[in-house]
């Protein structure tokens, strides 16, 4: 047996209040016409409107970030273990859309050797996990779904945009639309793209992911990975995470992405 | 039996409602830090803008009436 949670009860009571307000408002409007009373008309108009507004402004579903962190951390942990066990030493490279057929998919390539080399387009296949020439592993980036969500929210395909578009639109997306962070800045200097995220909802998750090998500064946590996917799509070039730092108070995350082809 | 409110009354009511909703929508924006309200803020903003627009329509009708009279 499941008991109704207080939140569900609150949502139901708000719906009932909405209906009651709308009903009383409509009655007041009818009486205002019968008795030709402007006061009743104002009351009726107000109540009907606020009742309708209560019903229209549906509740957004929120989950605690702690819950989100716990759900995603174990899969990252497994990924870290697999990479370590298979002994892939190279730095993860985010491949642009020219490497895949489906525009919504993404590939992060981890070379076997420490010296990362950009794989040729024909050497990579979406279906195959292990590539032989050059030797490496092709994985689905942990932040791919988040990148697709960014595209959905912005109503665009990053492959048809450029870095300037990301610099213009990502801060609004992060701060207002998705409320992921309090501030976001994207700056480009030569082939380095610096992304500064202030007070992100992923900050605790990031500090937990930092403890895992081969994740931070390589594949990255879902947020860093999502930005890397967006950059690879927008620039059409291969990207890797050069540096990933957090401020002492754990509030600001600074990620440096390197554009590997110019 | 007739509706007791005049065109001006409706216009005034629209203006006041639009102002209340616009202020609420602005205060719930992340710029002011009131982000923990569990409502669809986009819908609230849309409603506020529609009310404001309706008020502007009533103003335009009034101006047109003054010009043509």
Image (spheres, grey):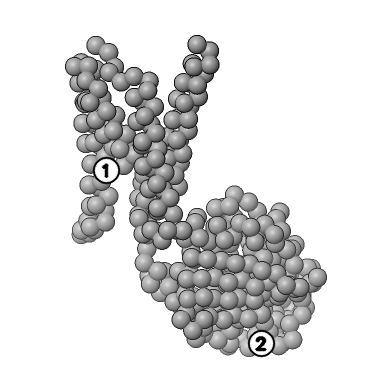
Which quadrant of the rendered structure holds the N terminus of chain A?
A: bottom left
Residue at the image point whose x is 61% and y is 71% from the top: A195
- The percent coordinates of residue A132 (x first, y second) are 74, 78
Quadrant assignment, res A43:
top left
Q: Which dot, 1 or 2, sits closer to the camera?
A: 1
Q: Of residues B6 and A21, which is closer to you in this image?
A: B6
Q: Which residue is mark 2?
A: A89
Quadrant assignment, res A171:
bottom right
Q: Which residue is mark 1?
A: A15
Chain at tag 1? A
Residue at the image point whose x is 27% and y is 43% from the top: A15
- Quick check: A128 left or right of A146? right
- Compared with A260, A3 (above or below) is above
Residue at the image point whose x is 43% and y is 73% from the top: A69
- Quick check: A52 left or right of A237? left
Q: Of residues A98 and B55, which is closer to you in this image?
A: B55
């Amino acid at each position: 047996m499941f008991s109704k949670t207080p939140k569900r009860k609150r949502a139901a009571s708000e719906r009932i209040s909405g209906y009651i307000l709308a009903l009383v408002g409509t009655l007041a409007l009818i009486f205002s016409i019968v008795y030709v009373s402007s006061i009743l008309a104002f009351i009726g108009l107000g109540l009907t409107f606020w009742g309708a507004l209560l019903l229209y402004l549906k509740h957004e579903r929120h989950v605690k970030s702690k819950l989100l962190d716990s759900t995603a951390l174990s899969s990252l942990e497994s990924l870290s273990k697999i990479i370590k066990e298979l002994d892939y030493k190279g730095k993860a490279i985010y491949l642009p859309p020219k490497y895949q057929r489906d525009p919504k998919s993404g590939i992060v390539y981890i070379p076997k050797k420490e010296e990362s080399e950009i794989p040729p387009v024909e050497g990579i296949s979406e279906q195959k996990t292990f590539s032989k020439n050059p030797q490496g592993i092709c994985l689905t980036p942990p932040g791919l779904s988040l990148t697709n969500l960014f595209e959905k929210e912005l109503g665009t395909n990053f492959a048809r945009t450029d870095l300037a578009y990301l610099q213009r639109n990502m801060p609004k997306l992060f701060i207002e639309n998705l409320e992921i962070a309090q501030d976001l800045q994207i700056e480009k200097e030569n082939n380095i793209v610096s992304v500064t995220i202030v007070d992100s909802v992923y900050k605790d998750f990031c500090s937990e992911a930092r403890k895992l090998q081969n994740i931070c500064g390589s594949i990255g946590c879902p947020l860093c990975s999502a930005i890397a996917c967006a950059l690879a799509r927008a620039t059409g070039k291969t990207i890797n995470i050069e540096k990933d730092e957090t401020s002492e108070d754990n509030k600001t995350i600074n990620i440096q992405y390197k554009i590997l082809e110019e | 039996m007739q509706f007791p409110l005049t065109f001006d009354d409706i216009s005034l009511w629209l203006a006041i409602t639009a102002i209340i909703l616009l202020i609420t929508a602005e205060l719930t924006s992340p710029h002011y830090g009131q982000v923990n309200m569990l409502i669809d803020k986009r819908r609230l903003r849309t409603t506020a803008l529609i009310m404001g627009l309706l008020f502007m329509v009533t103003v335009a009708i009034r101006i047109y009436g003054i010009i043509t009279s």
